[in-house]
Amino acid sequence: SQQGEEDPQALSIQEGENATMNCSYKTSINNLQWYRQNSGRGLVHLILIRSNEREKHSGRLRVTLDTSKKSSSLLITASRAADTASYFCATGPTSGTYKYIFGTGTRLKVLA
Amino acid sequence: DAGITQSPRHKVTETGTPVTLRCHQTENHRYMYWYRQDPGHGLRLIHYSYGVKDTDKGEVSDGYSVSRSKTEDFLLTLESATSSQTSVYFCAISADRSTEAFFGQGTRLTVV
């Protein structure tokens, strides 16, 4: 079963708007990561947030983590057509494992 | 970009034949992973390696085997290909368990 589950599965917004995607997971984590995948390409790492962090920023990206609710959110501000992609969360390995477990992704479409 | 190369990039094979996919890295990272990506399932972990000759199963390992005889190479073998193994296969690497994973460009495998 998947560790991470993204919500919504698909999102369509206008250029300039903000896009928010959510990720829920089931077990304790060491860190949580967000990746972007453009159509037909490999995944590109966006941002990593550790279990003792609550919020992290990188350019137009803001990630929050609530370990008590086992959830994370990715906010993309002032979206651009180039942000059109699928976005995945992944939970990083905890003690005793080496696995990155991915969710099913959110497909974001930014309309120009 | 992380130095990670998958070969072949595309392959069509017949049911019942063995197939080997290769992942080669130039980063000297300890951890290597094989995932498959299918519509509606996101990325699912097949096998992973935490060192030379150290491998373990992921969540969808049936019908697959792996080998890692050198740090830089991680081979995925489909022992007897089936149509259900038609998928896009991604290799990933990471330096340690608390950092991000880097992905290859993927191999599109079609079993006819």
Image: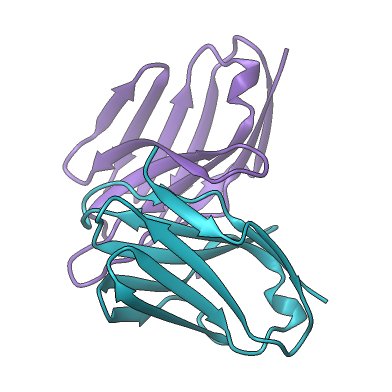
Chain colours: A purple, B cyan
The residue located at (37%, 25%) in the rendering is A62
> Along the horizontal axis of the image, is A25 left or right of B111?
left
Query: Residue B51, located in which quarter of the rendered image?
Result: bottom left
**Residue A112, quarter of picture:** top right
Instruction: Residue A81 in the image: state x and y as whole percent.
Output: 65, 18
* Residue in front for this viewpoint, A85 or B53: B53
Q: Is residue B107 above or below residue A74?
A: below
Image side of residue B84 versus residue B1, left or right: right
Residue B68 position in % (x across, y down)? 34, 76
A88 horizontally vs B33: left or right? right
Q: How many marks?
A: 0
Quarter of the image with the N terminus of chain B in it? top left
**Where does the C terminus of chain B fall, quadrant-wise?**
bottom right
Q: State the image coordinates of residue A48 (x, y, percent, origin top left).
A: 30, 39
Compared to residue B8, the image places residue B52 above or below, namely below
Residue A27 seen anywhere in this rendered image of the structure: no
From the viewer's perspective, tell me whether residue B103 is left or right of residue B42.
left
Question: Can residue B57 be seen?
Answer: yes
